[in-house]
Amino acid sequence: MVRLALVLLLGRSRVLRVFLAAALGPLVAGACIWVFRSVRVEPIGSSADSLAIQTPVKAHLRDGSTVLYRAGVLLARDTLRGRGVRYGLTLRDSTALSVVPLDSVVAMESFRRATNGAPTAIVSTLATGAALLGAAVAAFLIVCSSSDCFGNCPTVYADSAGTWALQAEGFSYTLGPAFETRDVDRLGIRPDRDGKIRLEVRNEALETEYFNQLELFEVRHAADETALPDRDGAPLAVRELVPATTIVDAAGRDLRRLLALPDGVAFRTDVRTLAGVSSERLDDAIYLVAPAPPRGDSVALVLRLKNSLLATLLYSEVMLGDRGARSLDWIGRELDGRAAALARWQGQRMGMRIAVWDGRRYRQTAHIQDVGPHAWKDVAVLIPVVHRDSVRVRLSFPADNWRIDRIAFARRARRPLVRTLYFGRLLDAGGREDPSALASVRLSDQRYLRTSPGERFTVVAEVGAAAADPAQTFLIATQGYYEPWIGRAGLSVARDTGARESADAELLKALRKWGTIREARERAFATQPSPGK
């Protein structure tokens, strides 16, 4: 039956996101609640032919099984060697073994749980039944080992006429607990006939995701207003949207027509700008001019955007991939030690910096963090009115880091009335309620819900009948972080990289590589079958 289910799954789609959800889950004695502080990796030693991984690790295999190495493992040429325990597809059987061919490994992850007297976190896992586990995990991992698996954040879907429609991405590029963040996104949905909102949350990447909180907001506003999150996630109600009179990029292209409507035809950095990147010139820019409002001291810049795959390439293939198996050590220990510095660098270099012309220079007034490459994000940013005749704004960002669908200015913006709602039910992939998992995501605290690749769950909120007047918009807040898996290709290359480059140098390396593969990578991304089909 498992074999038949696997064939059926693979027959429907080659892309990991369409598979049945399954928990790789707790792989020790069926435990479902863990106490831990963070993932930590001990130093890795190397020779010409091997690496001694000294921290406990899991090796996830192509057939969906997992090998647990409690005392670490030796990565010796084309094999893993060490005292391991292999857990089968249903987690009910285990076998001791000492040698695993590297070509049977899809990915590895560190899992040491260290408390050391520090504040601990309770981690719950979904109570997904074993019957759903084997085929889905096997299919997921086989696809990830043989094709591009894009993405590194949880995705949120809503049922739209029987088809799951993508609504949002949560906490993108939050690599490790030190980078945990809260993300707020606008939902394009209405309550169903029973006054309920149902959302499906999926782990569609090769990573372990930790959810601290899921929260729903209802925004009431006038019919001629649009409710959007601002750059900090606080709702804004905007009206009287007008286009910019000037929209020009660094290459001198007039972008007014391209960015006039939210039609999916998006801005990309000009090929000349991308080809000309250097250590002194990493950025692209867009320059905007709009009439100043007749009254008020601010306007709202309204953007519809998402990231290209550049940031994914930077973090996954350059920062991690170039380190090979040593990335396990980098994630668990080096990254924690340099988290503050890397966070500062992200704020200064990545995302989008918004600056206003004050008569002498552009002065930065806001920053939008990266939001991920899957879902369009609608956001409003309040801009100070410095001159009474016009508003002049510069958007700057790493070359080709963004896809921008629309830019407009709202002459009027206000803080609307917001009602905080809570999800009352959480169901696993089999439709079973999971009170423990629900409790883990109800509050922003030291309790987390852990999901594994291919896993999904549904949250349900009672919101009442849809309002007719005033209008009603819903926003979702997701808070958490993810721990990446290191794929087989990453384990077998660049095992001893020596001194590390600066973050700017790594970004330049990513930009140059992106310039050579952009078209092919985006075609592959665009042609992935739609999730839920």
Image (cartoon, rainbow, N blue to C red):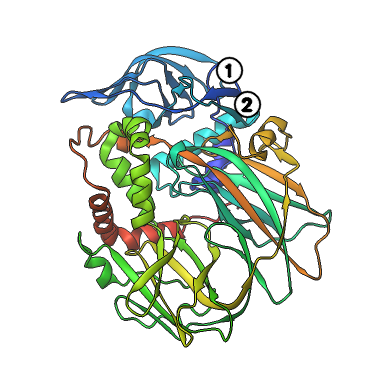
Q: Position of residue 232 (x, y in %)?
A: 54, 57
Secondary structure at numbered mark 2: helix
Residue type at mark 1 is Arg
**Residue 416 in view of the camera:** yes
Residue found at the very far left of the displayed protein = 48
Left-right relation of 48 to 357: left
Say above or below: 28 vs 234.
above
Residue found at x 40% / y 39%: 145
Crowd rating for badge 1 (residues with CA inside 10 Å; few <14, some 14–19, many 20+) = few
* Residues at marks 2 and 1, CA–CA distance in whole angstroms: 9 Å
What is the number of callouts on the image?
2
N-term mark: 2 or 1: 1
Residue type at mark 2 is Ala
Q: Position of residue 366 (x, y in %)?
A: 45, 64
Identify the residue position indicated by label 2 in the image: 130
> Nearest the camera: 201 or 91?
201
**Residue 313 in view of the camera:** no
Circle 2/circle 1 CB separation < 8 Å: yes
Tell me where residue 132 sits by quadrant: top right
Tell me where residue 468 sits by quadrant: bottom right
> Nearest the camera: 174 or 409?
409
Tell me where residue 378 sits by quadrant: bottom right
Q: Position of residue 28 (x, y in %)?
A: 53, 18
Q: Position of residue 329 (x, y in %)?
A: 32, 30
Residue found at x 69% / y 65%: 416
Crowd rating for badge 2 (residues with CA inside 10 Å; few <14, some 14–19, many 20+) = some
Residue found at x 49% / y 73%: 384
Secondary structure at numbered mark 1: loop
Q: Assign the N terminus to one quadrant of the image.
A: top right
> Nearest the camera: 477 or 196?
477
Identify the residue position indicated by label 1 in the image: 92
